[in-house]
Image (spheres, rainbow, N blue to C red):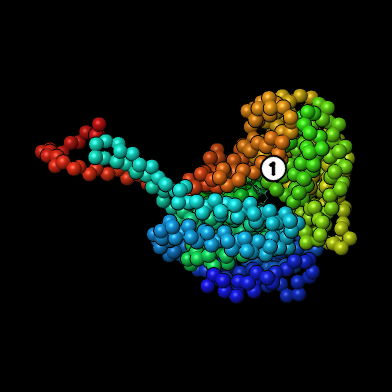
Amino acid sequence: ALHGSARYASAVSYITNHDKIVSPVDTKYFIDNQFVDSKTTEWIDLHDPATNNLVTRVPQSTDGELNAVVDSAAKAFPGWKATSLLARQQVMFRFVALIRENWDRLAASITLEQGKTFADAKGDVLRGLQVAETACGITTQLTGEVLEVAKDMETRSYREPLGIVSAICPFNFPAMIPLWCIPLATVTGNCLILKPSERDPGAAMILAELAKEAGLPEGVLNIVHGAAKTVNFIIDEPRIKAISFVGSDKAGKYIYTRGSEQGKRVQANLGAKNHACVMPDANRNATVNALVGAAFGAAGQRCMALSALVLVGEAQEWLSDVVEQAKKLKVNAGFEEGADLGPVISKHSKERIESLIQSAVDDGATLPLDGRGYKPEKYPNGNFIAPTIISSVKPHMKCYTEEIFGPVLVCMNVDTLEDAIDLINANKYGNGVAIFTNSGATAAKFQRDIEAGQVGINTPIPVPLPMFSFTGNKGSIAGQGGNYFYGKSGLNFYTQLKTVTALWRSSDAISTKASTAMPT
Ligand code: NAD
C-alpha cells in the first residue's frame, strides 16, 4: 500500500546528528525488490566525514550476488518492456511524489555519509528529482517518426529499450547522479543495475525503497556494491548492454575503453577544472559572492565547482574581496546550524588536497588564504579544510593542471579577454566555465570562442536543467562524447531505434516475375 505505516516509520526515524552510532547496521544489497544481507567476507568501512566514526559497512558484492542481480534483471526485462508506457509513467509519478515526501530523509543520509551540509544535500536531491519529474513527460518524449515514403508504403521508427543497463556512480552527489540514471533508464523500459559509490550508498538505497513503493516491478532496479571488482564484472558481463559512468578520469577512461571493447554503449563523465573569467565591467559585489559560493560550496567537491579564477585587467584588484568573503564562510559538520561547507570525503582526500596546496607554495604561488589545519571545535577528528585561495598561479603548476576537488580556488591574472579565452581553452578539461561581465558583446565573444561544454554568463555552475543535457566537453568526458546524460541525449542513450517499413497495397497489383533490382 502506497501509504502504509511502514514507510512513515522509516521516513521519520533517520539520523540528523553526528553522534557515534552505537550499533552500525551493515548496508544491504537490493535484488527483486528485497533488501538482502550480503554473504561477502570483504567489507568497506564507511565513516562520517565530520567525525570519522563508523556509520556502516558496505559489502563487496560476491560473484554469486552479482550474477544473481543480472539473472533477476534478465527475468524482469520482457515483462517490463511489454508494460505500457502509461503504466511506466504512473510509476514515475509516484516515484517523484515519494522522493519529495522523503526529501529530508534522503538529504540526512547524504550529510551523514558524504559530509555536505544539510541544505546542500537537499539541493543534491532536488537536482536529481528534477530529472525524475522531467521523465514523467515520457509519453511525448518517446514518440518516433513516421513518413509515407512511397505509394502505399510507410516507414516508422520506434524507440526500444536496450535491455539490461548499468550505472556506476561517484561519491559527490549520492542522490543526484543515481537519479540521472534511474528515471530515464527505467521509464524507457530497461532494467537497471546500479552501483552507488562504496563511500556513500545510503541515498541510493533509499531511492530503491521508494522505487519499489512507487510500483517498479521486481528486478527492474537492482543495487550492487563494491569497488573495482564490481565494475569489472559489469564491464565483462555480456548481458549488460550499456554503462553510465560518472567519476574520476582514471576510472572513467578505463571503463570507457574496456566497456567499448566489449561492445557496450558507454557514457562517461570525468573530472574538471571549471574557470570563471571576471571582467572589470562586471557587478563587483554580485560577482564576488557568486565566485565564493561556487568555489567553496560542497567543500569544492562538485564536478562543476568553480576551481580556477581568471581575473582580467583591473578585476585583479578584486582578489582581496574574494578573500574577505571566503573568510566569512563557516566550516562545520553538515548537520550544524549555519554551516556553509562541511568536511571533505576522507582522510586520504584531505591529505591529497593539502599536499596539492603545498605544491603550489613550493612552485612559487602565494597563499592569501590558507585553510589547512582548520578544526571546528566540536569535530577535531573530521576531514576539514577551510577555504583556501592560491594566487599568482601559472598554467604549468600542479595545483592548476590537476583537479583538486576540495575547497581550494586557484587564481590567475591576465590582461585581456583574448588572453583569458586562450588560457581557458588550453586547459585539458572542458566541463563548465563562466564569464562575469555587463557587456553583451564581451559575453557573446566569450560564449562563441570558449571550448567548454557548459557556459555560464553572470552565473557560475551552469548545470543545465533536465530538459537539456549535461554537456561536458574535452577531457571532462571520455571518448568523443555525444552520449550526454539526461535530456534528449539521455533518452537516446537508453533506447535503440527500430524502423519498420510496411507496404499495404490497396489495389491488387499483378506481377508475373520477381524483381531482383534494388527498388527505385
Ligand atoms: P571515482 O572514479 O573514484 O569513483 C567513481 C566510481 O568508479 C565509483 O563507483 C568507484 O567504485 C568506481 N571506481 C573507482 N576506481 C575504480 C577503478 N580503478 N576501477 C574500476 N572502478 C573504479 O570518482 P569519485 O572520487 O567517486 O568522484 C569524484 C570525481 O567524479 C571527480 O573527478 C569529479 O570531477 C567527477 N565527477 C564528474 C561529474 C561530471 O558530470 N563530469 C560529476 C560528478 C563527479
The reply, left or right, for residue 155 in relation to residue 85 is left
Q: Residue furthest left?
A: 512
Would residue 57 be visible to someone looking at this image? yes
- For image coordinates 80% across by 52% down, the residue present is 340
Q: Secondary structure at mark 1?
A: loop
As drawn, 339 above or below 277: below
Position of 75 relative to 275 (above/below)? below
Q: Is residue 460 above or below residue 107?
A: above
Q: Which residue occupies the foreground of this view, 93 or 253?
A: 93
x and y percent of residue 277 in the render?
A: 74, 33
In the rendered view, would you say 314 is above or below 453? above
Q: Which residue is mark 1?
A: 461
Report the residue at 79% width, 69% height from top: 19
Quarter-of-image position of residue 460: top right
Instruction: Please provide percent x and percent y for residue 410.
Output: 79, 39
Q: What is the x, y in percent for residue 327?
A: 87, 46
290 sits to left or right of 463: right
